[in-house]
Amino acid sequence: MSQRQIWLASMLIISINIRYLAEGKMIVCICHRVTEKDIKKTIANGAQTVSDISRKCSAGMDCGACRGEIRDLLRAETHKSPSVLAPVVLARAISG
Ligand code: FES
């Protein structure tokens, strides 16, 4: 996907969200119409990486423009950076 296509998808996400924000819903993934609430629920049900979330609710499976927002939601919900902290947590668990 080209940078222009990602930019256009991002603009579409923003324009649609302006309408949905007024209704208390925010669509994060326009390709699959996945809301912020859906993603938070997926994280609460055990998704630990962006790939986990994509597999479980399809968000981020097409153009990828939403993957940064998904990553931000994951960090906010888990209060950590999974890609950076996972090796640190593993190392601490191994070393005791
Ligand atoms: S907005 Fe295209 S995959 Fe999510």
Image: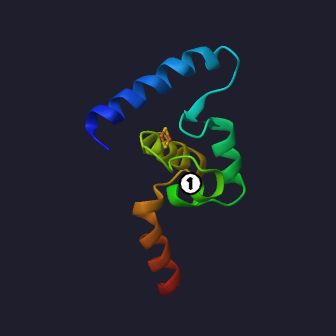
Q: Which residue is mark 1?
A: 54
Question: Element at badge 1?
Answer: helix
Please identify the quarter of the rendering in which residue 36 is found: top right
Position of the N terminus, as image quadrant, is: top left
Name the side, left or right, on which 24 lies relative to 14. right
Front-most of 60 and 42? 60
Percent x, y of residue 72:
48, 43
Q: Residue at x 35, y 36 (%)?
A: 6
User: What residue sits 59% from the left and 59% below the top?
Assistant: 55
Extreme left residue here? 3
Q: In the displayed structure, would residue 33 be above or below residue 62?
A: above
Q: Amino acid at mark 1?
A: Ser
Picture coordinates of residue 59, whole percent (x, y) = 56, 46
Residue at the spot x=33%, y=30% of the render? Answer: 7
x and y, in percent, of residue 12 in the image: 46, 24
Q: Residue at x 59, y 54 (%)?
A: 53
